[in-house]
Image (tube, grey):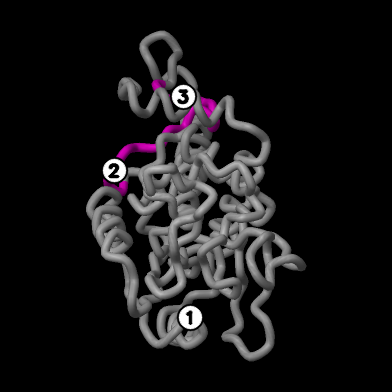
Amino acid sequence: MATAPTAATTATAAAYSSAPAFVHAAVAIVEQALERFPDLALAVAYNGGKDSTVLLVLLQLALSKRAAAAAAAKAGGNIGGGDDGDSGADSSADSAAVGDGGDAAGLGCVRWVYFTEEDVFEEQEEFLAASERRHALRLLRVGGGVKAGCAQLVAEHGVRAFLMGTRRSDPYAAELEPFAPSTAGWATCMRVNPVLDWSFEQVWSFIRLFGVNYCALYDRGFTSVGQRANSQPNEQLRNEDGSYRPASELRDAASERAGRDSSASSN
């Protein structure tokens, strides 16, 4: 007999079924990456920023779809398994749901990597720690910079691809593709960019649609988060009393990195 869905998983299934096309397209890219780079060859670059947090949920959705499809295939080979011919499994992949925590969706099938930096916000570190607990992540912290860290992961851990939260509005991302080989001088690997063509507004609509947890800094006027030295609240969100509105209320997406060093990627 199928396990009864909880209210949370039912809500998530409904959200995914009715999600806009850009969400389904991103999940499809993640599914392709899982097929092409199995056995921990796929790493997720996870720093607790809004875009990498979206990656976590996209991965949950892709893994849940795979699990539902596998269950449906198994049920199809067991005709008449239930008392009334009911296989006891939901045959729709789109009915897959994301749990609120733990590793029920198999998040341990990829490597979770945090390229550490100095001078990071305490709130970001707290959010990362909370994510580790909530989703039972084994977050590998790698120092020495992103370039050196990638080389170490490729050479020592067998990583062949990185799932990234890069969007086309980020510096140096205008010519990228969803699957983009590393550039000259970097370790040989594939960069997988499922949210490459998402807008700032789409990121926040996804977060709202799925009730995604995110770093508290975004509720304090930060629209892009990096190091303390190069990140400030966005002045377009400043209230008359000096407080700031949440990042999701920004109307001019072109100013997403206002208050942030222009060379920095958005998070």
- Closer to us: 263 or 91: 263
The residue beneath circle 1 is: 146
Bounds of the magenta span?
88-103
Q: Which numbered disc, 3 or 1, marks the residue that appears first in the sequence?
A: 3
Q: Which type of secondary structure does the marked residue at label 2 adopt?
A: loop
Identify the residue at horizontal 54%, vertical 57% (top origin). 34
Q: Which type of secondary structure does the marked residue at label 1 adopt?
A: helix
Say few, some or many: other residues with alpha carbon within 10 Å of mark 1 (under 14 / 14 to 19 / 20 or more).
Answer: some
Residue 11, compared with residue 171, is above or below; it is above
Identify the residue at horizontal 51%, vertical 64% (top origin). 259
Q: Is residue 154 on the magenta stretch? A: no
Q: Which numbered disc, 2 or 1, marks the residue that appears first in the sequence?
A: 2
The answer to whether 203 appears left or right of 244 in the picture is right
Identify the residue at horizontal 46%, vertical 78% (top origin). 158
Marks 2 and 3, how far apart at CA = 22 Å
Q: Which numbered disc, 2 or 3, marks the residue that appears first in the sequence?
A: 3
Residue 154, percent from left and from top: 49, 82
- Look at the numbered discs 2 and 1 and tell me whether their residues touch, using CB distance below 8 Å: no
- Look at the numbered discs 2 and 3 and tell me whether their residues touch, using CB distance below 8 Å: no
Marks 2 and 1, how far apart at CA = 28 Å
Going by the numbered disc 2, the residue's amino acid type is: Gly
Going by the numbered disc 1, the residue's amino acid type is: Val
Say few, some or many: other residues with alpha carbon within 10 Å of mark 2 (under 14 / 14 to 19 / 20 or more).
Answer: some
Residue 259, compared with residue 151, is above or below; it is above
Q: Nearer the viewer, mark 2 or mark 1?
A: 1
- Residue 90 circle label: 3
Going by the numbered disc 3, the residue's amino acid type is: Asp
Q: Is residue 95 on the magenta stretch? A: yes
Q: Quadrant of residue 188?
A: bottom right
